[in-house]
Image (cartoon, rainbow, N blue to C red):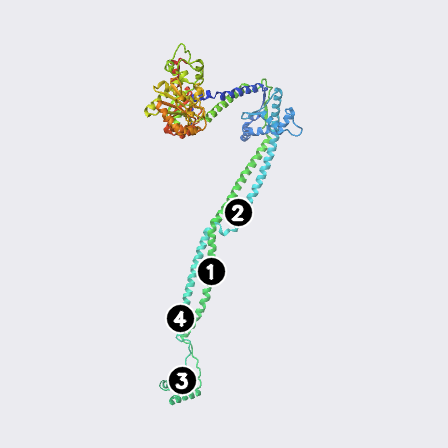
Amino acid sequence: MKENEGTKSFSPASVLRALRRRKLFLLLPVLLLTPAIAFYALRMPPRFRARALVGSDPAIAGRSSLVRPDALVALNAQDQLRAIRETILSTPVLERVIREFRLYNLPPASAPAVDIEAMRARVEIQVEGPESFYVGFEGAEPVQVRNVANRLAGMFLDRKSDLRGRRVEQEDNFLDSEVGVLQTQLRDEEDNLKLYKQGVAGELPERLAANLKQLENLQQQIHGKTDQITEAEARRSTLTEEVNALAGQGVLDTEAPARTGAEITLDQLRVKLRDLKTRYTSEHPEIRQTATQIQELEAAKTPAPVVRSQPTPVQLRYLGLQAELKSIGPRLESYRRERDALTADVQTFERRVNSAPAFETAVSKRARDASLTRTRYEALLARQQEAKLSHRAEKTDNDFSYRIIEPAQTPASPSGPHRVRIIVAGFLGSLALGLLGVFIAERANPSFETAEELEAFTGLPVLSSVPSIQTAPERAGMGKNKQPGNESQAFLLPGNLTAEQSRHFQEQRLAPLTDPGSVAAQQYSILALKVHQWMAQTGGKTLLVSSSSGAEGKSLTALNLSLALAAISEGRVLLVDGDLRLPQVHERLGMKQEKGFGDLLAPRGGEIDGYISRIGALDVLPGGIDRTNPIGLLASGRTREILARLKSRYDVIVVDSPPVVPVADSQILADLCDGVVFVVRARQTRPELLLRALESLGAPKVIGLVLNDVELGATPYAYAYRYYQRHYLGRS
């Protein structure tokens, strides 16, 4: 089933039909508001308006060649409209005028804001040309209106001259103070920039090239010092090795003195003693004798005299190397200190090079700020000089002023109110309000109007579109144009209808009985033919007629369908009132309330024949009197048994059931019947309610829909109905 995105389609025809249906929504605002607005407009007192023309002095035009262009622009009324309004509509001006002419009862202190606003609403300021404007006033007395308009124009001229002097003085003072402030600010910013540059002179962007060159020189000096240190360390290492080699050769030992005979003998004895000890023990006599001789010689030995000699060349070389080696240490320490100092200088210059961009940004910002301040200062200084020249020109040129060109005159006729316009506007407004009410009412009721809308929403076929049935026959001139439809269904009732029966059937809108030639009766006949075809194709006999809620015409449809089926069917037709809660079939047919379907379903209901009544060719089984526990009765096995027995006796059985959504009776009866015809009332059944009811019954059971209470003019084929009524029924 399709989602409902708005079942109504707006077209000129649908709009006209909506206006016809909702004519009260349209007419009530017009009938109520328009007279009230007209009464108010006619009761409004007349209003008079007077205007004074104010413009620049014509002397300006004669001396335009001597006047600067900016002075002429200053007198342009269009450009100065805001200033004009502020001057004339200011509270002091209005309060003074109110007190002079006693327009309102003002207290002695100050005028209330309400009276001032009311006064502003009565003043009119309108630009007439480039150099002129009107000052108008509206009121109930013509003479007072003229005088107030002229007074407002005169006060504008007075205040304009006073304001011009104060404006010149204020402008001069303002410009002087602003120039002084900017001058001080510019001086401070330039001093700060100068001090900043002095503080970071070595790190400024313009010193970047010199710093880079100095950094390169320092790095070269560091490399040189490193090379000197390397060479000195290598020299010291070489000298150390040579000194150690000379020391190992005994270059420092002194020359041995000449040996005596005793010393030579002593040495020989010592050698002999060592040899003897290798061969004999210490107790050997020869060893003892030799040892004694050695002792005697040692005791008698005297030291030889020392003889000093001159140093050799090797010793001189050794001493020179020692002196050179001692001088290398201090020199290395001096080289290292110089390299460390150069390294510190390199770090300093590297910091200057790396910080140059940041200082460049800071200097640029300070210089830019100072430049902007200087630009503003020079522009404001030029403006100050120009303003002073202009003010001196204004002081010497007394002809630059406004004057009253055309005083206000006493109005001869009222300027308002425009009563016709007010009435027309009120009528149009009330009409628009009525149209809005119609639109809201239509949108608030998203129901179905045509069979096409219903089919598009449900996807189910619409078997018949039944128009509204009048409670009286629509036929005109029945005596002189007898319709054939009367004879075709005359057999429905035995004998002729009495006047009371005819009136009752007309009130109950039984079209097949009272007006068989009407469009409604023909639509029921079409519905009966389609139901008959469905029964012939499917073999079904029982047909349930239901709706989603009450007051949608399901009982009326079931009754008229049964009458139409009885007229075209050769077999027997039975109408069963399955609405055990609120049976209506017996009332519509004018039958007495007797036992019926509910009583028959009771355990001791008895035989079927005692409950069936006959109306012409139609058999009727009314709802009955017993309405207790209708769901229990319908859900019992006896209900299925009774319907099976009725199927064996009748060819067509139409069951009128309760609404689907409120109660469960229709769902029980739908399971017992072969098919369901669902009744939808145009402009009343809501889409969501219909969707809920169809989902409850189940789509396979529903053979089609009946759109009840349709407006013929709403259908695309309305001309066909009108043609039928005009030419076949003789109705207009």
Q: SS at mark 3? A: loop
Answer left or right for 194 relative to 265.
Answer: right
Q: Amino acid at mark 2?
A: Leu
Task: Determine the residue positioned at 51% across, 20% down.
Answer: 30
Q: Disc 3 versus disc 2: distance between alpha carbons?
A: 97 Å
Name the kind of residue labelled 3 in the image.
Answer: Arg
Q: From the image, state whether disc 2 or disc 1 is nearer to you.
A: 1
- First-in-chain label (3 vs 2): 2
The reply, left or right, for residue 276 in relation to residue 581 is: left
Please state the horizontal and vertical placement of residue 671, each as a whole percent of the image: 38, 29
Mark 4 in CB contact with mark 2 (< 8 angstroms): no
Front residue of this view, candidates 18 and 78: 18
Depth check, front residue: 67 or 581: 581
- In contact (CB < 8 Å): disc 3 and disc 2: no
Marks 2 and 1, how far apart in space?
A: 36 Å
Q: Is residue 324 above or below residue 509?
A: below
Circle 4 SS class: helix
Q: Which mark is residue 193?
A: 2
Front-lying residue, 115 or 269? 115
Residue that badge 3 annotates = 259
**What's the residue type where badge 1 is placed?**
Asp
Distance from disc 3 to disc 4, alpha carbons, whole Å, reads 34 Å
Q: For residue 51, which numbered disc appears in the image?
A: none
**Residue that label 4 marks:** 242
Sequence order check, earlier mark of 4 and 2: 2
